[in-house]
Amino acid sequence: MDVTYDAALNGDSLTKALSELHPNVLVVRSTKVTAADVNADPKLQLVVRAGAGYDTIDVAHCAKQGVYVANCPGKNAHAVAELTMGLILSIDRRIPEGVQLLREQKWNKGLFSNSTGIKGRTLGLIGFGNIAQLVMDRAKAFELNILVHTRTQKPGLEKKLGFQYASSLEDLLARSDIVSIHTPATSETKELVNKSFLAHMKPDAVLLNTSRGTVVNEADLLAHLEANKGFWFGTDVFNGEPAGTKEIAFTHPLAQHPRVYGSHHIGASTKQSEAAIGEEAVRIIKKYATQGAIDNDNCVNKESDGSKLHKMTIRHFDRVGVLAHVFAIFASFEWNVQELENIVFKGREACVVNIKFTGDLSHLEEAIAGVRKNENVIDVSI
Ligand SMILES: NC(=O)c1ccc[n+]([C@@H]2O[C@H](COP(=O)([O-])OP(=O)(O)OC[C@H]3O[C@@H](n4cnc5c(N)ncnc54)[C@H](O)[C@@H]3O)[C@@H](O)[C@H]2O)c1
Ligand SMILES: O=C(O)[C@H](O)COP(=O)(O)O
């Protein structure tokens, strides 16, 4: 396999490289992958997001062009959970400011002796996937109580893992001392943190965001910070954050705010996490190269709604032309094959083909009779 590595490719330079090199697989971190990038490379088959969030990739356009998009769920979750705990403890004890003062050759025990402590306080988690669950595990070691608001509640999970589902988002916001966001960036979560969200929070609460900048309406948050002098924000992400990894000037009203502790979108950037992500990306590519398959856990643009599909199972002898015969009948009834699996039995004498398809079944009996006409068809069921 030929590999070209150039982490600096971005925007037009990425589009140009794709149009010249025509790779089959593109691996990216937070680099944006646009429709123009996909169109520039007709040989592109797979985009691997070496990370969790894939909002940076035009997933819908990839789906339209038959290009797989795969991510590496959970592989950087420990690192993000560790950073989240770091933000919680830093805010409670004002660690960064204490360090800064020492660097300025100043001692001020009084200034840093006002922390509340986190034991017995309530941490509200919004989203309860890979990262949030690891945050919960770590927070429980600090004796925080855990409240959860997520899209789908799983019966029995509260008791098993030792947390409580909030009855609503508003309930979680009203009862939490610390609220941490762990949802993906979607149209549903865009500006989830807005005036109304903040109004439900305790005035001296801590809000944490290690997910995406788009989840926060930054103007509303700034206004809330101004109006509530005990309110703190810890964030790893900013709207309009720089794309690269080199130092550049970054002026942002939240990044420079005295009650905001920010980091530089480094949630996933530990050596452990990068190694785990790298290994997973390689595993995905190897499996695709050798078996032509992407695991469902990784593929983010495979159609998963099979509820409207009909299924036909045909046992047949392993001879040339059986499937061609079946497909000709399907085409004559305007049945559209959606998924297909042909299993060959030991000895390569017989097979079973499972065909999932859409179409009008009013001529079903006629179609089945047509399939049976082939001498190598053993049985048909639907
Ligand atoms: N700061 C970083 O470096 C960094 C690293 C990894 C991931 N992330 C971000 O964190 C996000 C979460 O990562 P993860 O690995 O936990 O993902 P995940 O898919 O395992 O979990 C996401 C959770 O959010 C829930 N959710 C989705 N939409 C929701 C909604 N509208 N309301 C409530 N809950 C909702 C899902 O049900 C799921 O429980 C990623 O999508 C990514 O944007 C950031
Ligand atoms: O969604 C993710 O995995 C993180 O935001 C990590 O982004 P990065 O790969 O650019 O560090």
Image (tube, rainbow, N blue to C red):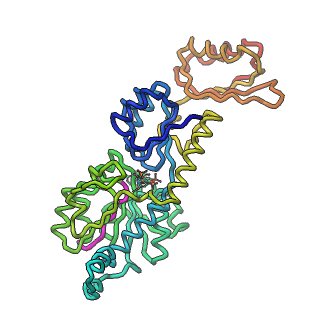
In this view, 21 is above or below 152: above
Q: Is residue 253 magenta?
A: no
Residue pictured at 18% horizontal, 56% vertical: 219
Q: Looking at the picture, does residue 116 appear above or below residue 60?
A: below
Relative depth, front residue between 297 and 264 = 264
Q: Residue at x 82, y 31 (%)?
A: 346
Q: Which residues are magenta?
A: 203-211
Q: Quadrant of the N terminus?
A: top right
Q: Is residue 264 visible?
A: yes
Q: Between residues 277 and 156, which one lies in front from this camera angle?
A: 277
The answer to which image quadrant residue 28 occupies is: top left
Q: Position of residue 280 (x, y in %)?
A: 56, 48
Q: Give the quarter of the image for residue 292.
A: top right
* Figure disc tally: 0
Vertical arrangement, residue 74 with respect to residue 158, above or below: above
- Tell me: residue 78, above or below residue 28: below
